[in-house]
Amino acid sequence: MANKKTRAQRRAEYHRQKAATEKQAQVVSQTNRQDNPEAKEAVQQIRLIPLASIVTEEYQRVLNMKNVAGIVRDFDPAKLGVLVVSHRTDGTYSILDGQHRLTALRRLGYTAANCIVLEGMTIQQEADYFRRQNENKQSLRIADTFNASVWAEDAESIRIKEIMDRYGFRLGKSGQPMCVCAIGALQSIVRQFGDVALERTLESIAVTWPRDTTILRREMLAGLGEFWKRYADVLTPRQFEARMQARMPMELFQELRRRTQGKAMPGTAFGKSIRFTACAVLVDAYNKGLRTGSRNRLKLEWDLTEDV
């Protein structure tokens, strides 16, 4: 039989967990009202939910199995907190916060968990809730927030996704042909150069280097965005292909690194001098073999009035 001290400790732990759960519920409610006005009418309550009824949607991040293994290895029920789920009309519960903890609980053999249950949300509101709850967390990749933004029907994200789909690109984690890891680079192209520049960038890659992965580096995407911002009105992707298909993207990238003395990196790719230099590398490769006086040669000038 537990002694008085043990029972007192258990009662204190129970009240601590209860207070923490109620506090998290208040935070969820407040955030939902402030960051997701369309879902402010959603009703919430704390319930014990069978894990078998909880589902994961495509707007969720890709599971990090190392994180799951760490939760399992160091499992402490007192630190688990509560999951946040959205109750749907089909009876299932979509996980909004706690996907890694959910997977760990299943591995540990648990069959149910305490959850903050939100009622009355659409799938778009769920995705938007997930994005807003997690966008400031360091562990959330930009690809995760982009995917959630598409499901939440964010206008910019939908336009980017439509252009990607049009030319056969997909979002992914590892470098593979036609697989974009640097989704932030596509967002930067749209915001700095416009939708047309992004479309020409992806189309020119699709027709010129569909099997290459170096061209999908952030540094090269920045250069292509700058290139098409300047030449979209005088050049087509097919003309680009005719002159550039024999050029190796790895050689272009190495030349960029040489000209910038190694300063061209993912973090500096959209700085003015780096993206301009990347554009210059592309222009020089395009002009190679053309006579100095040829009207087909591209001219490149540094505009001091441009953004830095």
Image (spheres, rainbow, N blue to C red):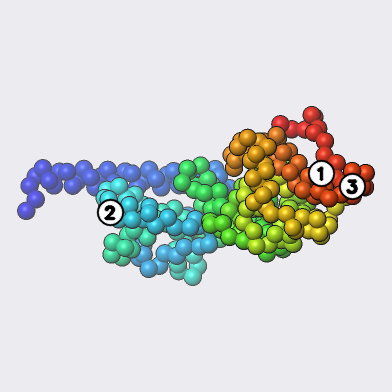
Q: Residue 142 location, x and y as percent?
A: 55, 48
Q: In the rendered structure, which disc, 1 or 3, sits on the residue that comes first in sequence?
A: 1
Identify the residue at image location x=75%, y=47%. Answer: 282
Element under disc 3: loop
- The disc labelled 2 sits on which kind of residue? Arg
Q: In the depicted view, which residue is nearer to us: 26 or 258?
A: 258
Element under disc 1: helix
C-alpha span from label 2 to label 3: 67 Å
Q: Residue 137 location, x and y as percent?
A: 48, 43
Residue at label 1? 230
C-alpha span from label 1 to label 3: 21 Å
- The disc labelled 3 sits on which kind of residue? Arg
- The disc labelled 1 sits on which kind of residue? Arg
Residue at label 3? 291
Q: In the rendered structure, which disc, 1 or 2, sits on the residue that comes first in sequence?
A: 2
Q: In the depicted view, which residue is nearer to us: 70 or 113?
A: 70
Identify the residue at image location x=44%, y=53%. Answer: 97
Q: Which mark is residue 73?
A: 2
Which numbered disc, 2 or 3, marks the residue closer to the eye? 3
